[in-house]
Image (cartoon, rainbow, N blue to C red):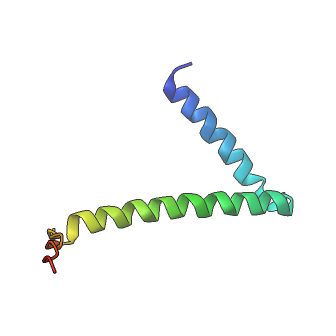
Amino acid sequence: MDVREELLSVLDKLWTKLQGLPQASPLELGAFFVLILFVATFFFLIILSCVHCCCCPKTKYQASRVQPLQPV
């Protein structure tokens, strides 16, 4: 079985699960929405990091220099 056939098999199983979602138990619905929320949060953070890296000007942060104490 090559990669394409395996991917199509997984997508077919996913499509079958999605079609049965209206008749699913509340536990299955909750698990599905938690997974959707996780995936959406992951993609949102990826997009946010790309926007921050590409669109924000690159500023160089200069560390503050610590001066030695003067002898008393």
- Given residues 56 and 28, the one toward you in this image is 56
Q: How many marks?
A: 0
Q: Residue at x 74, y 58 (%)?
A: 31
Q: Residue furthest bottom?
A: 72
Location of residue 35 in the rendering, given as x and y in whole percent from the top left corner: 65, 57
Q: Quadrant of residue 46?
A: bottom left
Location of residue 51 in the rendering, given as x and y in whole percent from the top left corner: 29, 67
Q: Is residue 28 left or right of residue 5?
A: right
Q: Residue at x 57, y 34 (%)?
A: 8
Location of residue 7 in the rendering, given as x and y in whole percent from the top left corner: 55, 34
Q: Quadrant of residue 60?
A: bottom left
User: Which quadrant would the C terminus be assigned to in this image?
Assistant: bottom left
Q: Is residue 45 above or below residue 16?
A: below
Q: Residue at x 62, y 33 (%)?
A: 9
User: Which quadrant would the N terminus be assigned to in this image?
Assistant: top right
Q: Is residue 31 left or right of residue 66?
A: right
Q: Residue furthest front?
A: 72
Q: Is residue 63 left or right of residue 38?
A: left
- Given residues 39 and 15, the one toward you in this image is 39
Location of residue 33 in the rendering, given as x and y in whole percent from the top left corner: 68, 63
